[in-house]
Image (spheres, rainbow, N blue to C red):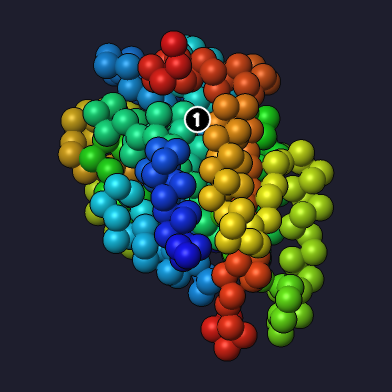
Amino acid sequence: MSTRPSQGEAVQSQLLNRFDLTARLLSRLTRDEAVIGGIGNTNFDLWAAGRRPQNFYMLGSMGLAFPIALGVALAQPRRRVVAIEGDGSLLMQLGCLATIAERCPANLTLLVMDNASYQITGSQPTATHYGADLVAIAKGCGLADSFWAHATEAYEGLLETALSSDRPHLIAARIDKSPGQGSTDRDPSWIRDSFMRGLGTRQ
Amino acid sequence: MSRWYDVIVDVLKRNQIRLVTYVPDKVLTPLIKAIEADGYFTVFAVAREEEAVGIVCGSWMGGLRGIVLMQTSGFATLGNVLASLAVPYQIPLLMIVSERGTLGEFNQGQALVCRTMRPLLTSLGIETHTLSRSDELDFTADRTISQAIATQAPAALILSPLLTHAKRQELQ
């Protein structure tokens, strides 16, 4: 049984931290960008990193953070949309990468937090633990601008490029096993209403 | 008399449903073609029905109304996303389901999965109407969509073979 071979670009990643990466994303947002957080710890760290009305916290529907973000991006092409997803969630809905590539929304940035495990259920290994490379998969689906962020500085640089690009970007980071730092509110209709007010679709 | 798919295109436009996502089906093909031929719509296929639901829920929150087209067997994959996203978040997810598995079905799996559709919709309290008559089509589809939007609740329109007249040899 192999564990996490060095892949593709042959640079061994240092393990980054999901909360830190999420906080770094939020600190860059200045134009009411929408952020969609996937189920579980991805969402918990988005919540803990700073609540904003333009954040959508997904409580169920595992795997659908990227599709939801695509819908928001299509509805509001002038608003930048960022989605954050975990490796287990993305593995559940890989087809969405091909759909996003085909639609090619200029305003969509996809972040993948890859801890190689279903962390919240007991850290069972995901396929990325055994070598599945989500960046290679994304590229294979047609998302040419897909990158591993091998270090914090690289992540910052990739994020800066992605958030000003006219093509969808996917940035993945191998992260440590730190638990999520918060816990989202559990009221779906409130989350939806707040998000819509943040997007200006409800007064 | 108008063709069923032309009536649905008209109803969608009347209700400002501009985004159409689908997993294709033989019966849906003339509807998909009619939608693709009309510049009013943004229309594309997705890999899975669940993905389409995510897209349309996102677009609605962003101010763009959408609908998902699918077959009975695809609907059967939606239990979790309906129960965890569309219903509790009070999103008026609109669905058109082409009904396989009844009135002349030859595929046992289709016949079985068809029987799960209405019980699932009922158990989640989702407003559902079966479109089987041309003379009721416009009214039923239009009112179902407008009520879904007004009440912020998902709704399903089931396209019966009685309406679409799919020939058995075309069901492959």
Using the image, determine if residue B37 lies above or below residue B63.
Answer: below
Image quarter hosting the N terminus of chain A: bottom right
Q: In the image, residue A193 lies at what x, y percent? A: 54, 18
Q: Going by the image, does B143 lie left or right of B107?
A: left
Within 10 Å of disc 1 (Cα), the crowding (few <14, some 14-19, many 20+) is many
Residue at image coords 63%, 57%: B131
| Residue identified by numbered label 1 | A37
Letter of the chain that mark 1 sits on in the rendering? A
Q: In the image, residue B40 lies at what x, y percent? A: 29, 47
Q: Which type of secondary structure does the marked residue at label 1 adopt? A: strand
Count of picture labels: 1
Q: In the image, residue A110 lies at what x, y percent? A: 37, 39
Q: Is residue A129 visible?
A: no
Using the image, determine if residue A149 lies above or below residue B51.
Answer: above
Q: In the image, residue A164 lies at what x, y percent? A: 18, 30
Using the image, determine if residue B121 lies above or below residue A121.
Answer: below
Is B50 in front, or is A11? Answer: B50
Residue at image coords 27%, 33%: A77
Q: Is residue A37 visible?
A: yes
Is A174 in front, or is B134? Answer: B134
Quarter-wise, where is residue A179 in the image?
Answer: top right
Residue at image coords 51%, 15%: A194
Image quarter hosting the C terminus of chain A: top left
Q: Going by the image, does A39 lie left or right of A202?
A: right
Q: Going by the image, does B97 lie left or right of A30?
A: right
Quarter-wise, where is residue A120 in the image?
Answer: top right
